[in-house]
């Protein structure tokens, strides 16, 4: 048990050290982010060959933005609860999926388009629904709960 605890603490510390090492983000990208998200917290940057990704909290919503090297936004992702969904989508979900509860939402914005990937649950199943801002939706996966 003592070895397991020592291993767990070592793993946690090494993860913290890795996460603490900042990416070499260009001034253009930092400026673009800081101008738009002054109140962001828990900011973590990742650098890739042709882009940067920043993970952060904004208004208590877990968010990610992918920037190109010039500071232009390529895509955004936000993860939140059903209460933050637009009202029209909430109403259509209730009408098309009565009795199901929103478990979580992933909002993806890229190239001028927004899509909502919504996980619904009922007593026996998980339902994965893709929804557009105009309210059109389709179920793309369904899993039986264990």
Image: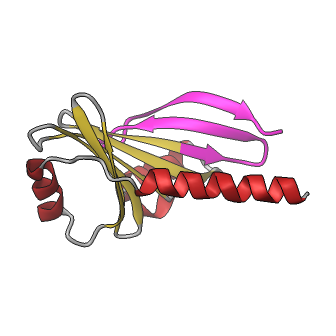
Image coordinates of residue 19 in percent, x first then y, are 45, 53
Q: Quadrant of residue 134?
A: top left
Which residue occupies 12% across, 41% down?
72
Residue 61 or residue 25, whichever sits in front = 25
Would you say 73 lies left or right of 82 here? left
Image coordinates of residue 97 in percent, x first then y, are 58, 44
Would you say 15 lies left or right of 36 here? right
Q: Is residue 91 visible?
A: no
Image coordinates of residue 125 in percent, x first then y, are 73, 39
Residue 112, compared with residue 10, is above or below; it is above
Residue 128, compared with residue 37, is above or below; it is above
Residue 37 or residue 8, whichever sits in front = 8
Which residue occupies 23% across, 46% down?
24
- The quarter of the picture where the N terminus appears is bottom right
Q: Which residues are magenta?
A: 119-146
- Inspect the magenta stretch and tell me whether residue 67 lies in it: no
Residue 134 or residue 125, whichever sits in front = 125
Q: Quadrant of residue 73?
A: top left
- The quarter of the picture where the C terminus appears is top right
Which residue occupies 25% across, 41% down?
52
Would you say 13 lies left or right of 81 here? right
Q: Is residue 37 visible?
A: yes
Which residue occupies 63% across, 56% down?
12
Q: How many marks?
A: 0
How is the model colour-coded? Answer: secondary structure
Residue 48 or residue 5, whichever sits in front = 5
Image coordinates of residue 110 in percent, x first then y, are 24, 36
- Inspect the magenta stretch and tell me whether residue 142 lies in it: yes
Q: Residue furthest bottom?
A: 39
The main secondary structure of the magenta stretch is: strand
């Amino acid at each position: 048990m003592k070895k397991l605890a020592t291993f767990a603490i070592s793993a946690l510390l090494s993860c913290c050290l890795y996460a603490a090492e900042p990416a070499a983000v260009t001034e253009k990208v930092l400026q673009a982010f800081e101008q738009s998200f002054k109140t962001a917290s828990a900011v973590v940057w990742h650098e890739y060959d042709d882009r940067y990704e920043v993970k952060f909290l904004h208004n208590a919503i877990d968010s990610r933005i992918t920037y190109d090297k010039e500071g232009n936004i390529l895509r955004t992702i936000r993860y939140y609860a059903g209460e933050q969904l637009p009202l029209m989508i909430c109403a259509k979900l209730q009408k098309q999926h009565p009795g199901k509860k929103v478990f979580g939402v992933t909002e993806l914005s890229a190239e001028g388009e927004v899509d909502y990937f919504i996980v619904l649950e009922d007593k026996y199943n998980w339902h994965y629904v893709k929804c557009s801002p105009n309210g059109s939706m389709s179920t793309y996966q369904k899993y039986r709960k264990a």
